[in-house]
Amino acid sequence: MSEALSQLKYKIDLNRLPEHVAIIMDGNGRWAKARGLERSAGHVEGVNTVRKITEAASELGIGYLTLYAFSTENWNRPKAEVDALMELIVIAIERETPDLIKNNVRLTMIGDFERMPSTAVERLRRCMEETSRGTGLVLNLALSYSARWELTEAARKIASSVAGGKLAVEDICADTVAGALTTASMPDPDLLIRTGGDHRVSNFLLWQIAYSEIYVTDTYWPDFDKDAFAEAIIHYQSRERRFGLTSEQITSLTE
């Protein structure tokens, strides 16, 4: 375990880690503005934070890390910023792929890839293929993603199955919807982290975070280091997860 994490590891119960952590990485632009820099400088520094937090999650033994890298709403930003950010994401993933392989990390992606440049998708798919044998942390990038888009696509899949006679309307249940989502192969996030201080979920994994613990920090994403990540895990472990039950019921189930 790295020196940065070792300072807080005594506070972390490794037997009660969140299996899946999702992060809304916010504050790159504000971080840059506060330093008199172009927004692109914040995105570059944010990429460095992605590497640090991926390393931390892998070191701790977390199973899944989903990062909100680019939303469908982000396509509405100035074209120059969008093009630069998309290229930065692709270059960063290509650069990190050897280390992902070395650290047994498997890369996956969710999102509306039809809106992305085909060359970017092809390059990212190559990285996914190169890391496909990883059996440790699953690093899941949400690119050109929004939960409303995902739920709409899930509804279309289910409607198509009903129209084709493969599924009866009365058999549609919560598991049917979950199975039609882009995250069907993953457990729902136990912990949702949002950096940058805003208290909203921004159209991110709306179905999946129904029972996630939510941790908001004012720290901008470029400043969110391994210690900050450890603090979020420690906070998560201080919470009682009841899933609609009472504290007494939870206690009786664990006795």
Image (spheres, rainbow, N blue to C red):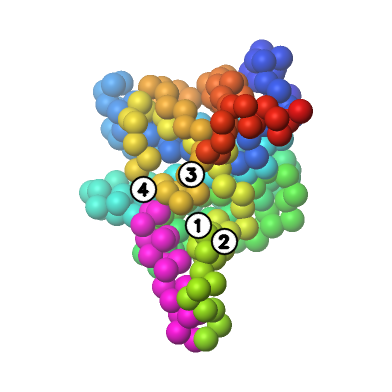
Work out how far the residue at label 4 is from the one at label 2, CA to CA, in angstroms: 21 Å
Q: Secondary structure at mark 1?
A: strand
Q: Which comes before the other along the chain, label 3 or label 4?
A: 4
Task: Report the mark closest to the observer, 3 or 2.
Answer: 2
The numbered disc on residue 175 is 2
State whether residue 188 is above or below residue 240: below
User: Which residues are drawn in magenta?
Assistant: 146-164
Mark 1, Cα crowd under 10 Å, few <14 / some 14-19 / many 20+, is some
Residue 15 rendering spot, x and y as whole percentages: 74, 29
Q: Would residue 230 be counted in the magenta stretch? A: no
**Nearest to the observer: residue 175 or residue 6:** 175
Which residue carries the number 4 mark? 203
At x 67%, y 37%, the residue is 62
Disc 3: which residue: 209
Disc 3/disc 2 C-alpha distance (Å): 15 Å
Instruction: Estimate the spatial distance between the alpha carbons at disc 1 and disc 3, rounded to whole Å.
Output: 16 Å
Quadrant where the N terminus sits is top right
Task: Find residue 122 and name its label.
Answer: none
Tag 2 secondary structure: helix
How far separated are the C-alphas under marks 3 and 4? 11 Å
